Amino acid sequence: MLEFRLKSYEKFLELENPKFGPQLPFSFDEILYYKNEHAKYKDDWNNVDKNVKNTFCNLGVIDAEDKYLDGVSNQYESEVIYHKKNTNKDIIFLSTDEALQQYPDLFKEYFNNLVKYDENKYTALNGAVWSGGTFIYIPKNTTLDRPLQSYFRIDTESLGQFERTIIIVDEGASLEYIEGCTAKSYSSNSLHAGVVEIYVKENATMRYSTIQNWSTDVYNLVTKRALVESHGKMEWIDGNIGSKVTMKYPSCILKGDYATGNSISVAYAKNGQALDAGAKMIHLGKYTKSNIISKSIAESGGTANYRGTTRITKGAYGSVAEVKCDTILLDSTGKSDTYPTNIVENNSSKISHEATVSKVEEDKLFYLMSNGLTEDRAKELIITGFISDFKKELPMEYAVEINRLLKE
């Protein structure tokens, strides 16, 4: 691992920032790359530092644990500080650091296999300084009754968080995984550069739901990718509400025949925010299917862009892909652009792409306000209707959370 970190650091120094997307003017010299003031993680909240416990309690994370989840992993700053498995089923659910120690052969098989350290400046940085994250292995034909969840929190000014997540869903198994992200607001910038590698085996199903509500001083630059085998299914449910800048494009490589990849995302940008989000679907297997639904909302000078790639390769006969991008502008200063790349390399497959842009219609506002609603409440109803495709895919408690965030 030391050799890998040094090699990653050398590549980080060589690579430049992306040539596309929002500007990234922060200084790497001002970022704190590791902070951990706590001993080994706990499995009892009574043994967790009181201030840290109160933080997660106020976020509603502790209340959700027993009601809705089969396991939780909570990362504070650079390390997992609380971890607990609530199911008796024979799964591996550990912090990534612990999995490296306990399952070195399994770890080596999947680490840096799907997302290579030298892909871009931020995968290289993650390779050099990664800490924390979640490692999950779901055995063959195993289905959990409830989701697993990880929650990431930054409370320190100018901190960088670099978790590494690896998930393997074996043949015939299924998993629903939930990720939450928040940070305390400061005047200086923080950096979140995580890497996620997911392996969906034959006939397996995986759903990865994220609600990202970073404070508006966080640069959120992550790489997330899934490899899907024959008859497997991967779903990304991706909500982007916070951060100063987000660049995130969850990807599916549909390797096996009849594999399926879906992505439903929402990006809501307000003043000072640039959210560049989307998805990538790469069809390799025959008769594969993908579906991308992107919802963008912008107001008060914020920018919410869709950037995505759908590629059906030469050997992916009979494959079908759909892309739908919808944008709603809440005022005259919000901005949104769509940057699709759609490629079909054989004559038996097809891609459809649809994009719409609209403003909040005055007659709809007038109708709702004439029935006693305030302008803010009327806009809230219009927005929640606009993202209904996204909301209905969320677990109940997260649907409630997204309503609260949009109301704020």
Image (cartoon, grey):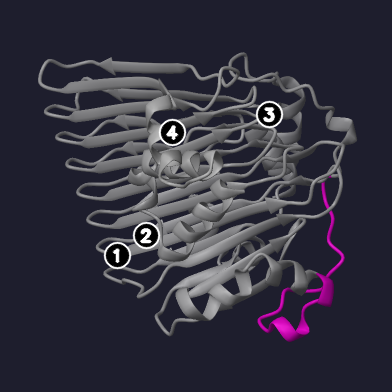
Query: Would residue 76 be seen by someone viewing this image from the given angle?
Result: yes
Task: Pick whichever of labels 1 and 3 is earlier in the sequence.
Answer: 1
The amino acid beneath tag 3 is Asn
Q: Is residue 399 above or below residue 281?
A: below
The nearer-to-camera label among 1 and 3 is 3
Task: Pick whichever of labels 4 and 2 is earlier in the sequence.
Answer: 2
Is disc 3 surrounded by few (<14), some (14 to 19) or many (20+) residues within 10 Å? some
- Give the camera-side residue of 138 and 77: 77
Q: Which residue is mark 2?
A: 169
Which SS type dominates the magenta stretch? loop
Q: Which residue is mark 1?
A: 173
Q: Is residue 339 above or below residue 47?
A: above
User: For the residues marked 1 and 2, what is the alpha-carbon distance in whole angstroms?
Assistant: 6 Å
Q: Quadrant of residue 152?
A: bottom right
Q: Secondary structure at mark 1?
A: loop
Q: Quadrant of residue 26?
A: top right
User: For the residues marked 4 and 3, what is the alpha-carbon distance in whole angstroms?
Assistant: 22 Å
The amino acid beneath tag 1 is Ala
Q: Which residue is mark 4?
A: 365
Q: Which residue is mark 3?
A: 271
Q: Secondary structure at mark 3?
A: loop
Q: Secondary structure at mark 2?
A: strand
User: For the residues marked 1 and 4, what is the alpha-carbon distance in whole angstroms?
Assistant: 47 Å
**Residue 18 forms part of the magenta stretch:** no
Q: State the image coordinates of residue 216 (x, y, percent, origin top left).
A: 72, 38
User: Residue at the spot x=75%, y=29% of the render?
Assistant: 10
